[in-house]
């Protein structure tokens, strides 16, 4: 049960029901499955536990009006963007500098601050030949990491152990590699 | 935790905890990592949790759940909101109403309180009138004014304040002067002519007050009784102190107040002993008579709305005539608003309203002389123009508060725009922006 992917249709029903009734318990049901993600996100930016908890409540308050007035396609990504923006605004008003993670920024989809399309895209693992070709084209480190992670299904820890790259680098290679592969795949299909 | 098949499809708090504690198998870890790669949301959340202990995460999440639960159980959010607005509006309306009431009818209040306040404020006795015998509070207050002793008391106590309702004597309006509000007005009404005569005839036509007129009549009806009982009450309160005054050798001043401009008598002028609440009002001939308490400063303050107040030292004198000039700030031409500014100077320290550089008097003259009547019109009336005087004296933001139609309004604005310069308002030494209202009169006969 715990690991079922969110039932998109059920969510849409909840959203519609809330729009109609304004019933907060419905909104609560909508929000509940993602509450921990929102909290974690706030923790990442705000660092402070109490502040983050308050932020979660503030974000919920925002939902009360925002869900009614927006057209939401994918609740999870919409909530993600909303929460992240809230945290960033908060930081801005506190005049903190946002620590940029060493992660590849492309991982963060900054296309628009508003509604974002669902950006979960799994690599098309069926197009294997294309993929193999693209992998060959990758830089060594990226290639290594990608292969270890995706093809051999290793965890980060294992990859680190096997390559002696440090964790951050491993993550970085994998993300950059992934992006390059995507570009490569897309350009190939053109 | 339980999985469906081999795939972990969402990141639950339990998974997060396990991942952080390293309790997952490599395969599972891989799955989690893959998930995070695919979803920024999960990735960032995980990053956030890396900074806290799993126990803390547990605690925080359950506390959050409780808070959400509490929040979602608060129903009817929109309705109270609406009610709040409604309530706020009602309160505003009521307070505005009350404010207006207070501003408009302080007179009434005063009048009414006069009856009650007879005693507390210091009253004043006229020695001549005294008949010491009458002190005792036991004097029966029956109504009839004919008890001379009683009358005297009444009189003395009542007297001097702003008014006197005297049914035998010509009763005119009781003048209710705000400035003299501390002087207890009163009524002592029934007074024998003989005794009353030397008293003040108060006939202030100037500040005729409907209320007082009405009260006069009422007084007539039951005046004696009331005043008598009031006086009694007053006396009861005063008791000895009254006697004390009586026996003191107060300084009695008399005199006449005239206008400096034409020498005509000024009735209704307040005459107060500085530093006390003892005062009187000039009668129809402009005459007054006042006793200065023994232990008070012998300075009299003469004041009247529209005229410049005067303080005069009277030590050693017993007759003092005064001439009063018009006040340079013409309140009649400046409408005082509740929050604006204007010629009202009694507010806080060191505040000076904006004024024409050439002075109000000259400015008025300018307005009167330069009015250009709109073509073909001969209406009589006034236009009130409100505008801002900036810190440099520049004027802007013209707004018509009282209109006589476009033609007149425009002429009024033109007059002001093309008119003399303005000096900005000041607070202490600092120039500040201010709002001014000017009443422009249109009178075809001017």
Image (tube, coloured by chain):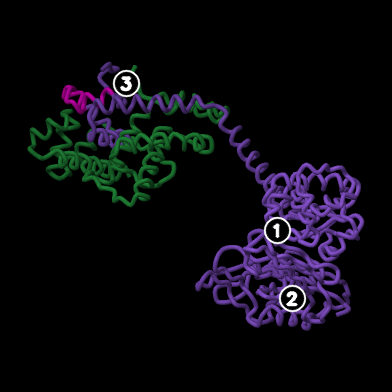
Chain colours: A green, B purple
Q: Secondary structure at mark 3?
A: loop
Q: Nearer the viewer, mark 1 or mark 2?
A: 1
Q: Secondary structure at mark 2?
A: loop
Look at the numbered discs 1 and 2 and tell me whether their residues touch, using CB distance below 8 Å.
no
Q: Residue at x 44, y 41 (%)?
A: A115
Residue B202 is situated, as x and y percent measured from the top left of the image, at 84, 63
Residue at label 2? B320
The residue carrying mark 3 is A3
Do tags 3 and 1 sit on the same chain? no
Q: Quadrant of the N terminus of chain B?
A: top left
Q: Residue at x 53, y 28 (%)?
A: A18
Which dot, 3 or 2, sits closer to the camera? Answer: 2
The C terminus of chain B lies in which quarter of the figure? bottom right
Q: Residue furthest front?
A: B133
Crowding near the residue tagged with mark 3, few <14, some 14–19, many ≥20 C-alpha atoms within 10 Å = some
The image quadrant of residue A51 is top left
Name the image quarter holding residue A190.
top left
Q: Spatial distance from mark 3 to mark 2, Cα to Cα? A: 103 Å
Q: Is residue B143 left or right of residue A142?
A: right
In terms of depth relative to the viewer, which is nearer, A119 or B115?
B115
Up-down relation of residue B154 to residue B61 (above or below): below
What residue does disc 1 label?
B247
Counting from the top left corner in percent of width and height, residue B115 is at 77, 48
Contact (CB < 8 A) between labels 3 and 2? no
* Residue B298 appears in view: yes
Numbered range of the magenta stretch:
B14-30
Relative to the observer, which residue lies in front, A41 or B280?
A: B280
Residue B37: image x %, image y %? 26, 35
Cα–Cα span, label 1 and label 2: 24 Å
Residue B78 circle label: none
Circle 3 marks a residue in which chain? A
């Amino acid at each position: 049960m715990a690991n079922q992917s969110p039932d998109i249709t059920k969510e849409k029903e909840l959203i519609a029901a809330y729009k109609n009734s304004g019933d907060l318990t419905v909104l609560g049901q909508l929000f509940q499955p993602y509450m921990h993600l929102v909290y974690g996100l706030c923790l990442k930016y705000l660092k402070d536990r109490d502040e983050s908890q308050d932020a979660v409540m503030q974000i919920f308050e925002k939902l009360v009006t925002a869900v009614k007035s927006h057209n939401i396609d994918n609740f999870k990504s919409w909530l993600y963007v909303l929460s992240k923006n809230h945290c960033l605004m908060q930081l801005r008003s506190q005049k903190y500098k946002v620590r940029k993670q060493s992660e590849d920024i492309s991982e963060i989809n900054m296309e628009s601050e508003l509604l974002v399309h669902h950006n979960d895209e799994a690599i098309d693992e069926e197009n294997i030949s294309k993929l193999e070709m693209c992998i060959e084209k990758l830089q060594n480190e990226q290639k290594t990491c990608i292969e270890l992670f995706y093809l051999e299904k290793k965890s980060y820890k294992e990859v680190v152990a096997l390559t002696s790259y440090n964790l951050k680098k491993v993550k970085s290679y994998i993300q950059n590699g992934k992006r390059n592969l995507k570009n490569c795949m897309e350009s190939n299909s053109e | 935790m339980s999985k469906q098949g081999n795939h972990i499809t969402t990141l639950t708090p339990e998974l997060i905890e396990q991942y952080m504690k390293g309790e997952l198998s490599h395969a599972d870890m891989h799955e989690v990592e893959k998930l995070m790669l695919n979803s920024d949301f999960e990735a960032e959340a995980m990053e956030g949790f890396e900074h806290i202990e799993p126990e803390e995460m547990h605690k925080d999440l359950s506390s959050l759940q409780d808070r959400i639960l509490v929040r979602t159980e608060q129903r009817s959010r929109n309705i109270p909101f609406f009610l709040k607005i409604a309530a706020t509006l009602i309160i505003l309306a009521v307070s505005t109403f009350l404010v207006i009431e207070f501003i408009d009818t302080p007179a009434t209040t005063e009048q009414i309180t006069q009856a009650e306040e007879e005693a507390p404020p210091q009253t004043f006795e006229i020695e001549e009138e005294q008949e010491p015998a009458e002190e005792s509070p036991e004097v029966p207050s029956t109504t009839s004014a004919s008890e001379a002793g009683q009358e005297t008391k009444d009189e003395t106590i009542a007297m001097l304040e702003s008014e006197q309702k005297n049914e035998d004597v010509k009763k005119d309006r009781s003048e209710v002067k705000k400035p003299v509000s501390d002087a207890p007005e009163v009524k002592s009404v029934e007074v024998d002519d003989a005794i009353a005569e030397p008293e003040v005839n108060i006939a202030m036509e100037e500040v005729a007050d409907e209320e007082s007129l009405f009260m006069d009549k009422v007084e007539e009806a039951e005046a004696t009784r009331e005043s008598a009982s009031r006086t009694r009450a007053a006396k009861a309160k005063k008791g000895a102190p009254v006697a004390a005054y009586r026996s003191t050798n107060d300084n009695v001043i008399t005199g006449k107040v005239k206008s400096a401009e034409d020498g005509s008598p000024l009735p209704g002028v307040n005459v107060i002993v500085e530093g006390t609440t003892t005062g009187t009002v000039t009668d129809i001939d402009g005459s007054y008579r006042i006793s200065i308490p023994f232990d008070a400063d012998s300075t009299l303050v003469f004041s009247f709305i529209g005229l410049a107040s005067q303080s005069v030292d009277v030590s050693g004198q017993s007759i003092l005539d005064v001439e009063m000039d018009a006040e340079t700030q013409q309140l009649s031409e400046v409408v005082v608003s509740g929050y604006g500014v204007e010629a009202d100077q009694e507010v806080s320290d060191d505040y000076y309203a904006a004024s024409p550089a050439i002075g109000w008097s000259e400015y008025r003259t300018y307005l009167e002389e330069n009015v250009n009547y709109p073509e073909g019109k001969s209406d009589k009336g006034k236009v009130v123009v409100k505008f801002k005087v900036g810190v440099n004296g520049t004027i802007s933001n013209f707004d018509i508060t009282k209109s006589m139609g476009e033609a007149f309004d425009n002429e009024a604005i033109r007059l002001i725009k093309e008119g003399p310069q303005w000096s900005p308002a000041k607070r202490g030494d600092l120039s500040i922006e201010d709002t001014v209202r000017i009443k422009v009169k249109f009178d075809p006969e001017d």
